[in-house]
Image (cartoon, rainbow, N blue to C red):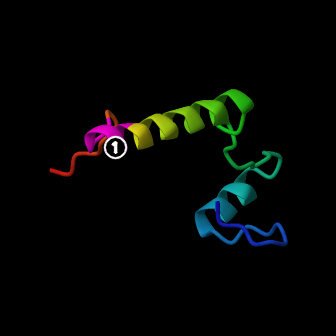
Amino acid sequence: MGQNFNGQITDPPTKQLQELYPKVLLTPHIGSYTSPALTDMIAVSYENFHQVLSTGHTDNDVKLE
């Protein structure tokens, strides 16, 4: 969301939505910032790194075609 450090919305579409719905609270998405999610991200990252060192690729390779 376009917002400066003073809490002012700088993104025009978001500003329009705020003006249309002044009683709606806008918040950033932080749903993945939980202890289990962080643990899983670390575990997957470690496994990817280990697979690359061992085999040269990972199960999570991104194929650009």
- Considering every residue shown, the one lying at the far left of the view is 65
From what the image shows, is residue 39 above or below residue 28? above
Tell me, yes or no, whether the highlighted magenta stretch contains residue 8. no
Quadrant where the N terminus sits is bottom right
**65 and 9: which is toward the camera:** 65
Spot occupied by residue 40 in the image (x, y as percentages of width and height): 58, 30
Residue beneath the point at 68% across and 64% down: 15
What type of secondary structure mainly makes up the magenta span? helix
What is the magenta range? 51-58
Q: Residues within 10 Å of mark 1 (few under 14, many from 20)?
A: some
Tell me, yes or no, whether the highlighted magenta stretch contains residue 56. yes
From what the image shows, is residue 55 above or below residue 6? above
Spot occupied by residue 28 in the image (x, y as percentages of width and height): 70, 49
Residue beneath the point at 73% across and 31% down: 35
From what the image shows, is residue 15 above or below residue 35? below
- Considering every residue shown, the one lying at the far top of the view is 36
Q: In the figure, is residue 12 to the left or right of 27?
A: left
Q: In the figure, is residue 59 to the left or right of 25?
A: left
Q: In the figure, is residue 45 to the left or right of 25?
A: left
Q: SS of the residue at dot 1?
A: helix
Q: Give the total of numbered labels.
A: 1
Instruction: Say what amino acid the circle numbered 1 marks.
Output: Val
